[in-house]
Every structure is written in structure tokens, then in C-alpha cells.
Amino acid sequence: MRYFIIGDEDAILGFGLVGVEGKAVQNAEQAQEAFSTALEQSDIGIIIITERVADLIRPQVDRFIFTRNFPLIVEIPDRLGPLEGKPGIREMVNQAIGIKL
């Protein structure tokens, strides 16, 4: 099982340093293409996508999240920080495990 990241150049570079393949995108068309490419690869188990890029193709991301279980789609903040109204990683972990960290 492999990971795949879709985001800005900084996110791709950072994840690339630990061996995660990915695609840097700058617009909705590129984001849709990268997302489709990742979904076509059966050995990708987790797709990491930055929040801002996910918002560019929100209907496609949500449709996939709510209709399929695999691969797992994980949205993360980019270098500019989390989007307003989105829970931080700590909040999501607290909700998932039921323990305040």
C-alpha cells in the first residue's frame, strides 16, 4: 500500500523527502487530473490532499469520500495553515480516540 499526496509544491517537497509520491497542482483542472490518476492506481491506499486543493475539486472529493471506503482520503492544512472552520489535527485526533491530548 502506497501513499500519494496532492497539493502545492511545498507539500509535495516535504512528503517527497520521506518517500511519498505526489503531484503539485495549481488549479482545479490539474487537481482533478491528479485526483483521478491517484484513484486509478490500485496500490494507493491513502491519498493525502491539502485543504485548499481539495476545495478546488470539493464535489469530486466529497462524492468519493461518501461513497467509497478505499483508498482513505486525508485532508491536511498547507503551509498557510488550516482553512477557517476546519478542525485542526489535534481536534480530529481527540474526536477519533475520545481522549483530550
Image (cartoon, rainbow, N blue to C red):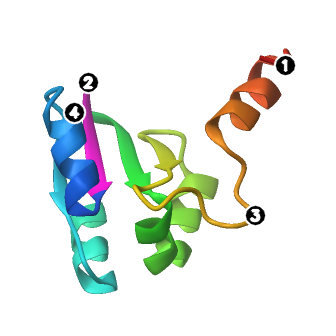
What residue is shown with label 4? 43
What residue is shown with label 3? 85
Q: Residue furthest front?
A: 80
State if disc 2 and disc 3 touch (CB < 8 Å): no
Secondary element under disc 4, as helix, strand or loop, is: loop
Which three-letter amino acid code belongs to the residue tagged 4? Answer: Asp
N-terminal label among 3 and 2 = 2
State if disc 4 and disc 2 touch (CB < 8 Å): yes
| Residue 5 falls within the magenta-colored stretch | yes
N-terminal label among 3 and 4 = 4
Q: Residues within 10 Å of mark 3 (few under 14, many from 20)?
A: few
Image height check: is 9 above or below 19? below
Q: Which residues are magenta?
A: 2-6
Distance CA(mark 2)–CA(mark 4): 5 Å
Secondary element under disc 3, as helix, strand or loop, is: loop
Which label sits on residue 1? Answer: 2
State if disc 3 and disc 1 touch (CB < 8 Å): no
| Residue 48 falls within the magenta-colored stretch | no
| Rendered location of residue 99, percent (x, y) | 84, 15
What residue is shown with label 1? 100
Which three-letter amino acid code belongs to the residue tagged 3? Answer: Gly
Residue at image position (77%, 17%) is: 101
Residue at image position (46%, 62%) is: 80
N-terminal label among 2 and 4 = 2
Q: Is residue 99 left or right of residue 80?
A: right
